[in-house]
Every structure is written in C-alpha cells, then in structure tokens.
Image (spheres, rainbow, N blue to C red):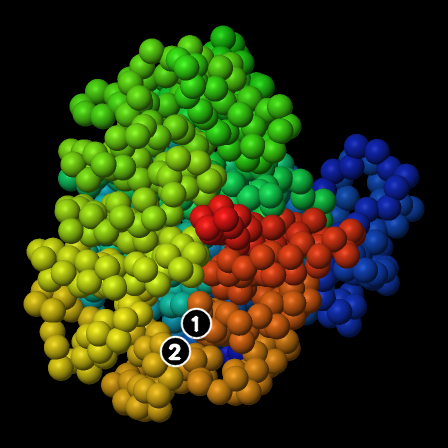
Amino acid sequence: MRYQLHFAIPEEKDAPIDAEVEITFRLAETGLPIYLDFTQPTAYLGEMEINGKAVQPDHREEHIVLAASDLVAEFNTVKIKFRAGDGSLNRQEEFLYSLLVPDRASAVFPCFDQPDLKAYYDLSLTVPEGWKAIANGFTKETEQAADGGIFFRFATTDRIPTYLFTFVAGKFERIERTIDGRTLEMFHREPDSAKVAANVDALFEEHARALAWLEEYTGIEFPYQKFGFVLIPSFQYGGMEHPGAIHYRARSLFLDESATINNRLSRTRLIAHETAHMWFGNLVTMEWFDDVWMKEVFANFMAGKIAREIYPEVNHDLNFVLAHHPASYSVDRTLGANPVRQQLDNLKLAGTMYGAIIYNKSPIVVRQLEYMMGEEPFRQGVQDYLELYSHENASWPDLIDILDGIAPELGLKSWSEVWVNEPGRPIHSLEEGTLSQADPYDRGRVWPLVFEVGLGAEPYIYSLQDPSLSWEGPEQGWNSTGLGYGVFPVANSTLQDLPEVESALQRGAILINLYENMLEGRTVRPIMLLELALRMAGTETNPQVLSRAMGYLQNTYWSFLTEKQRTEYADKVSASLWSALQAQPSQDLKKPIYSAYASVAQPAKALVNLYRLWNEEVLVPGLTLSVNDRSSLALSLMIKQPEWYQELVAAQAEKISNPDRRKRFEFVAVAAHPEKEVRDSLFATFGFAENRGVEPWILGALNLLHHPYRQQASFDYLERSLLWLEDIQVTGDIFFPKRWLDASFGSYSSPEAVELVESFLAERSDYNANLKGKILQAYDQARRAAEIQKAEAPQ
Ligand SMILES: [Zn+2]
C-alpha cells in the first residue's frame, strides 16, 4: 500500500490546509465495498476519483465508502482532494507538528487507520517562506513554489503504520552531526544559544550510543533511512517515536545547569526509550492496540539496560523496585485490577488501557521472563522475533511462541496466561515448613515465580512452580531484592531488624512487603508500621527508601489508624519527625521527613512550627523550601487552622512571582476555604467539562476538598464524582478519570464511603467495564482501611 500526500500549509494558523491524497492498494478479492477512515465533516471532501473514474464521495459515520463496483482485483488507485483536519496538527504561530497516535491519522487525511495496515508514504509540503520541514523520509527536493512559499518533497518512507507517519514544519534550527559514520539531525527552536551549546553534544552522543547499543543487542542494523529528532516546546508527552523524526518535549532534553543526576538519568532513559522503539514498535508493530504495552515495556526495558551502562554509580535495582512495585500493587491488589494484555474492542477506548499495570507491572513481568530464561536465551528469542517480523506486525502470542521454542521446559504459555492475560497477584504464607501460594480471589490461579529470600550479600533464589513448596530456607528477608512479585511472609524479627539491614535495596524491598502485609490485614498492624517508619526517619540513609517510608507513614496515619489511635499518637509522631528533621544531615534526607511532618502535624505546637517555617521566621539548617513547597504548606495550614486562611492566601499569593503558578494557587485555595458554601459552589462547577480544562488544578482542589479534616463536610461530593465520571472519561485526558477518582476517594476510610461506591455499582449492572474497574481500583484503600480500622477498634 502506498500514500502520495500533499499538504499546502499557509502562514496563518487558522487558515484551511488544502491537501491531496492518492492511495494505491492491492485487493486479493473483489465484490465487497472498502472503507477509508476520515473523521472530518463531509464538506471537507472535494473531487474524488477511483481508478480514474470521477465519483461523488460517499462519506458516512466517519468512513468514505468505496463501492465494490468501482474496485478491481489487484491494484486500485483512489485520489481525493480534501481539506485537512487540523486538530491533530498542533498548529501554532510559527510551527506545526502532526501527532497521530493512536487513531488520529484519519482525523487529518483519508486513510486506512489501523496499526496492521502498514504503507509507504510519498509526502510533499508547501510551507511559508522561512520555514523548514521535517518528515519520516529524507528531504529530496526543495524549491520555490510557483504561488509563493517553499515546496519540499521527501523520499518515500520505509513501511510504517499510520500512527508513526509524521511531518513538522516551521521556524526551526537544524544541526547535523556525524558520529561513527552515522549522520544524525536535530531540529529545535531554543533561542538561548548558551543552553543549546551546553546540551547539544550530549544529545547527539546519547542517541548515537543508544543506536549502537541497540544494533548490538538486537543484531539488526538501524532499520530506517535516516535518524532525526525534533525538540518541540510544550510537546504533550516526553517523546514520540516517529521513525526519522522523533518528537521530544524540548524541556526534557535541554537541561538547565542546576540539573541533578536524576534529571540526567531521566533524559538518558527517555532518549534510549524512543530510540529503542525504532526496533520495538516501529520495525515490528503490534497488530492491534491491545498489545500497546509490548512496545512500551520493551522500550523501557532496553532503556533500563542502556542507562545502567551509562550511570554505573546509580542503584538501578533499588530504583526499579521503588518505581514499579508499589505502583503496580496499588492497582493489582484491587477488585478492579486489569491484566497486562487487555481486551480492546473499540479504538476510542484505547485511552482507558493506560495505567499502572502497563507502566509498572509489565516491566516486572518481563524482568521475570528474562531471569527465568537467562539473559542470552532471552536475547536470542527477541532477536528471532525482530528478524521474523521485520517491517510487519506481530502479537504477544507470536513472541511467546518463539520464546517457548527456545526454552520449552519453562512452560511459558501457561506462565504467560496467568502473568499477562490475568490480573492480580499471589499471596504467600509460610506454615510448618511449607511455603504456600494462594489466589486472593479464589480463582485457583497459580503464579510460577522466581524470587529471592534472605539478607546480606547473597540471598537464596527460589523458583516456585506449584502452589506449595516445602521450606527449609531462611525466614527473614522475603523477596529481598524485589525480583519476585506478590505478598510474602514476614518474620517476627523483621520489623525490629529492618532499619539495621545493610543493603538499601533490601530495606526498600522488604519495607514494601511489610506495607502490603498490613493492607492484607496480616502480621503487621498499622501502629507497628507507624513505629517502624518513625525509627527509619531517624536512621535511614538512603533518600529514596526514606521517601517511601515517609509516604507509608502519612498513609498509615491518616487512613489506617483509628481516630483514637491517631489522637494517642499525634504528639509522638510530630515530635519524632521534628527531631529527625533536625538530625538528618542533608536536604535529600530532610525533604521527605519535612513532607511527612507537614502532612501529619496536628498538635498546636507542630502547627506553629510549620507556620514559622512558612513565613521564614524559623529555618531548619540544611532544609531549603521552594515557593511551591511554601504554597502547599500554606494550603494545608489553612485547612488545619481556618482562622489563618485570609492571611495565608494573601501573603502566599504575594510570594509567587510566576503568574501561572499564582493563578493556580488562588484557584486551589478556594477549595481550602473555611466556609462550606464557598467550597460547595466550587465543587458544583466541576460538573461541567468547560470548568475542568486545567486538570492538575482540579486535582489539587479535590485533594483539599477531601482532606481528612473535611471529609464529613465533603461526603456528599462523592456521589456526584461518580455520576460525572462517564462525562469525564469522554472529555478528559487519558489519565484523568483514574486521577479524579483517586483524588476523591483516596483518603476515605469510613464504611459509609465504601457503601456508597458499592451501591452505586450495584445499581448499574451495565456500567462501562473499564470505568467500573477504575472505580474499584480507586476505592480499594477505603475498603481495606474500613476493615482494618474495624479490626483495630476495641470490641
Ligand atoms: Zn514509548
């Protein structure tokens, strides 16, 4: 299949874009009509020809119907003049760029908009004087256009799906470098030449390095005709992997002087991720968006390997566990958990598939797979897969077939069934010398699993294939390297010993397991976890582990302690955190403690301390608070001390010099207003899509409206939050529905809140299954907290 496309791009960003397409495609059999996708109004379509014969476009329900009688066996040609839809062309004053993932190509031009219908593209553009143009293929010709502007013709692309087709045009600077015989090109709009100079070498080198690494790993040379990347201001995502013209958010690649090692590491990972997509996703493409997770997980997996080589000084294993396990469990432990590989019947619902399971569980699953197979056999399988399906499409079962052929003894098909096609996680218990695995939802599932147990330099490795295993191994340090997945037993001594364990990776992984045990209502009581976190505040030396511990502390304090326990512990918690805040030696260690202190502070003395920190009367040596930190602090103080409201709002707004941030602060502060009527009217506005435009502001406001101090007053918002959800899914960004629910239900623990959700769902048996899943995910903590508090309450 081949598309010849021309777009005439005018200078003014609102003027229509005239365009033409000629599509050539082969039909094996005739007798049926064929449907082209085009989601713009019929009025956008002009003259049309099928195989040389002029026809009237038959456009209905977002399709152009090609009548069977006009089509022939073998090659057909359809020509259409049209006005391009420009919603996905991101038109701005001096530039535009197309972003067509997942199904937006048909919003721009008539096409067969599916990932498995790959094609060659011959693109030409006419652009205003002074503009440059970039596309998937080389620039073949540039000339003055007859009626003004510049004409660009690009070389025929490689064979690509519609979602990877792109062009960018506008006022850009082009820089070219040749590294190891390979020429790379970069386009950007950064006016600060010092900033460009400070970053440009690293950008080229890191791309070249990632390319060389991937060629070596995959055994396949870079599969496209050219390598180019474009830095776009305020690009929607970190990056998008169009072959020949990767798009990046400019801010993610041009770092400031103050960039930390973490910023540089993220940039390396992003560059490696997008580069890895050239093989994973682009060369071999998913058949359908139900396998969208595959390209993401492989791109991340490869990026992780590349970053490991570039930054040997970073604790990558610890990063992996802290980044993936808690986030994955937060969905996978719930009644609404979805599998890694989800059903997708309608591309319009593709947005609901994204979430913690794709981003956080899949990497854990693929790491298990590599571990079970061994690095080399796994790599061999990946190479065979890329080789076999080069420039074609393939699905997850195709890959599993290949891997199964390499390691038939592992039973990878049944392994994949439970890990990839099923949701959920296993729960392990140790009793009388037997380790047993249970399915928390009694569906009889068994998760084959490799995990490590033990503390110190060499934990023992276990491979669990059956739901029970006779146990003679250590009783301490379950899943101590985070290789495994699920809930593991806790030895009695662990809570006592954990702060002294030498390895930060082991402290982090074990801490996560303790928290999951508390949520499962076994062994670890909330007050035990709270006491442990308080000790760690004083002793923990790794900032990331400390941050995790302080997050758990806040959650435990507000959601899992009973009211009575919270009253008993309030003074002790505040006092211990305050002294740990003084004692810890660095900003990196003080900051997570400060955040926990600011959250849990209740006694008058603690609030006065915070007030003085906020107005800079008191300083904690070594702790620096940014304007953003002070804004958050002001917001939480105005809820805890409503009589300070007016002063805090006025004085903090004064301190914020960035006008966007000040607007955000003033908007969100209304949600902390002492008068219920004011808050009620703010919440009521959220029922209309036009008031939810700036989603981060809405989430900030919801967090305050549902603050633990305000939950009784805000309880009646919860039902409306659910009633509006379907509209939110249709009108909001892909991540917004889940975030909306989390911000609304996240900190409740009352049986009434649980009951409200359950009866809402019970009354709606035909409710959208994906959204129902999101609701069940979001109310899970409330459900568990209500049960745990009931168990903790005196009988
Ligand atoms: Zn990606």
Instruction: Tell me what residue is drawn at x 43 percent, y 53 percent.
Output: 560
- Mark 2 and mark 1: Cα distance apart in space: 7 Å
Residue furthest to the front: 795
- Disc 2 on helix, strand or loop? helix
Q: Is residue 533 above or below residue 665?
A: above
Q: Position of residue 55 (x, y in %)?
A: 86, 59
The tag earlier along the polypeptide, 2 or 1, is: 2
Q: Is ligand 1 less than 8 Å from the beta carbon at label 2?
A: no
Along the line of sight, which residue is nearer the eye, 772 or 85?
772
Q: Is residue 170 above or below residue 137?
A: below
Instruction: Tell me what residue is drawn at x 42 percent, y 26 percent.
Output: 368
Along the line of sight, which residue is nearer the eye, 449 or 661?
449
Instruction: Tell me what residue is drawn at x 43 percent, y 72 percent.
Output: 709
What kind of residue is marked 1? Tyr
Q: Position of residue 390 (x, y in %)?
A: 52, 29
Can you identify the residue that label 1 sits on? 709
Q: Is residue 330 above or below residue 436?
A: below
> Residue 587's image quarter?
bottom left
Left or right: residue 403 versus residue 644 is right
Q: Position of residue 359 (x, y in %)?
A: 46, 44
Is any atom of residue 257 visible in this view?
no
| Within-10-Å neighbours for mark 1: few <14, some 14–19, many 20+ | few
Can you identify the residue that label 2 sits on? 639
Residue 226: mark: none
Tell me the quarter of the image containing the N terminus. top right
Left or right: residue 434 versus residue 533 is right
> Residue 617's image quarter?
bottom left
Is any atom of residue 612 visible in this view?
yes
